[in-house]
Image (cartoon, rainbow, N blue to C red):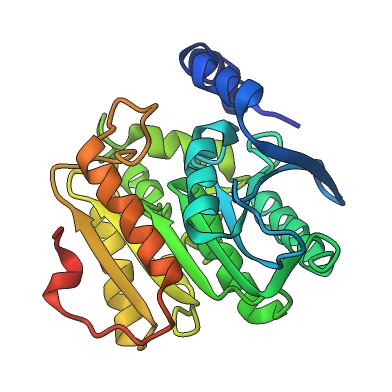
């Protein structure tokens, strides 16, 4: 049952719907995707958008990239990633599956994570029928989608049913507990008040904020898949991202971090006010390079922390 705070989501979504209408409709009308749905136990049908290479060869078994959009756990605009999913499919010659995961506050933590895991597992079980290579699966998440992606990787350490080969976290939130602690200390500023809103919409209990599936920085990072984190210089989340990276390196995780100068949260997406065309192009090229290069152990050095 929704509480008083939860009900404030509808005005927030209304404002976003008005703002995002044009690109959402454009992708729905002209995007070259195949849409299918998978029914889950806790959240009903979850929609998936499949993007294939424009020059697809017949009977070719494709690597798979799962994409999880941003939106603070509460906004569902998979269309914002449509053009990028198609480009990845073309450049990497892979299948990109853009999953419109369950949203809070209607579906609070951990439903988004558990049902998305269920959806990916179902897709991989049917991989042969879909001409997908179940042994070549990667995941990319943006903002809150990055949080969920990392949580899925942690969950798979226990379940061992999916096996992500690589993971890309694009300006992720890796320590939602940071904002809950600031609230308790009466130190919430205008800059980070929206992150607290997301936490209150997303969590049934704020005490869950230190759960590793909510704040992956509290998890066992030693067995993460090969990981690339993109951070923006002016993003309020950058410091926690660096802490996550440092912790992961201490336990010898296979991880790299790159900070994009003169950029803010959302800089990679052309629909956002924070869009930085030059750095966005650089970031997407870096993502493509990471996903196509052969697996290797990354050596920690200062170059990993700077934009080229």
- Residue in front for this viewpoint, 189 or 74: 74
Residue 261 position within the rendered picture, expressed as x and y whole percent measured from the top left = 14, 49
Residue found at x 72% / y 60%:
120
Q: Residue furthest top?
A: 18
Residue found at x 48% / y 46%:
87
Task: Residue 209: tell me if it is visible.
Answer: no
- Residue in front for this viewpoint, 223 or 260: 260
Residue 284 drawn above or below residue 27: below
- For the N terminus, the image quarter is top right
Q: Quadrant of residue 265?
A: top left
Q: Quadrant of residue 266?
A: top left
Residue 80 position within the rendered picture, expressed as x and y whole percent measured from the top left = 50, 33
Task: Residue 190: tell me if it is visible.
Answer: yes
Residue 126 drawn above or below residue 235: below
Residue 242 position within the rendered picture, expressed as x and y whole percent measured from the top left = 25, 65
Horizontal side of 265 relative to 302 (left or right) equals: right
Horizontal side of 36 relative to 238 (left or right) equals: right
Residue found at x 60% / y 46%:
54
Horizontal side of 247 relative to 97 (left or right) equals: left
Residue 33 position within the rendered picture, expressed as x and y whole percent measured from the top left = 67, 38
Residue 128 drawn above or below residue 72: below
Residue found at x 30% / y 85%:
250
Q: Quadrant of residue 202?
A: top right
């Amino acid at each position: 049952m929704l509480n008083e705070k939860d009900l404030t989501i509808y005005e927030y979504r209304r404002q976003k719907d008005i703002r995002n209408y044009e690109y959402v409709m454009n992708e729905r009308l002209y995007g070259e995707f195949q849409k299918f749905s998978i029914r889950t136990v806790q959240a009903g049908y979850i929609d998936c958008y499949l993007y294939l290479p424009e020059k697809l060869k017949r009977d070719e078994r494709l690597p798979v990239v799962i994409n999880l959009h941003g939106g603070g756990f509460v906004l569902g605009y998979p269309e914002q990633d449509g053009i990028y999913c198609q480009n990845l499919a073309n450049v990497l010659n892979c299948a990109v599956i853009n999953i419109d995961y369950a949203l809070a506050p209607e579906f609070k933590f951990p439903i988004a994570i558990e049902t998305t895991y269920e959806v990916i597992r179902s897709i991989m079980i049917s991989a042969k029928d879909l001409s997908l290579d179940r042994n070549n699966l990667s995941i990319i998440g943006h903002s809150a989608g990055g949080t969920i992606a990392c949580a899925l990787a942690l969950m798979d350490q226990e379940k061992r049913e999916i096996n992500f080969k690589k993971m890309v976290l694009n300006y992720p939130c890796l320590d939602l507990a940071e904002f809950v602690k600031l609230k308790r200390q009466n130190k919430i500023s205008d800059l980070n008040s929206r992150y607290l809103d997301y936490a209150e919409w997303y969590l049934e209990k704020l005490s869950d904020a230190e759960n590793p599936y909510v704040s992956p920085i509290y998890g066992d990072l030693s067995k993460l898949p090969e990981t690339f984190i993109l951070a923006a210089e002016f993003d309020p989340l950058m410091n926690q991202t660096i802490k996550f990276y440092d912790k992961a390196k201490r336990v010898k995780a296979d991880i790299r971090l790159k900070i994009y100068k003169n950029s803010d949260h959302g800089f990679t997406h052309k629909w956002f006010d924070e869009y930085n065309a030059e750095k966005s192009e650089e970031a997407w090229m870096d993502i493509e390079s990471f996903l196509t290069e052969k697996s290797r152990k990354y050596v920690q050095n200062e170059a990993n922390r700077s934009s080229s």
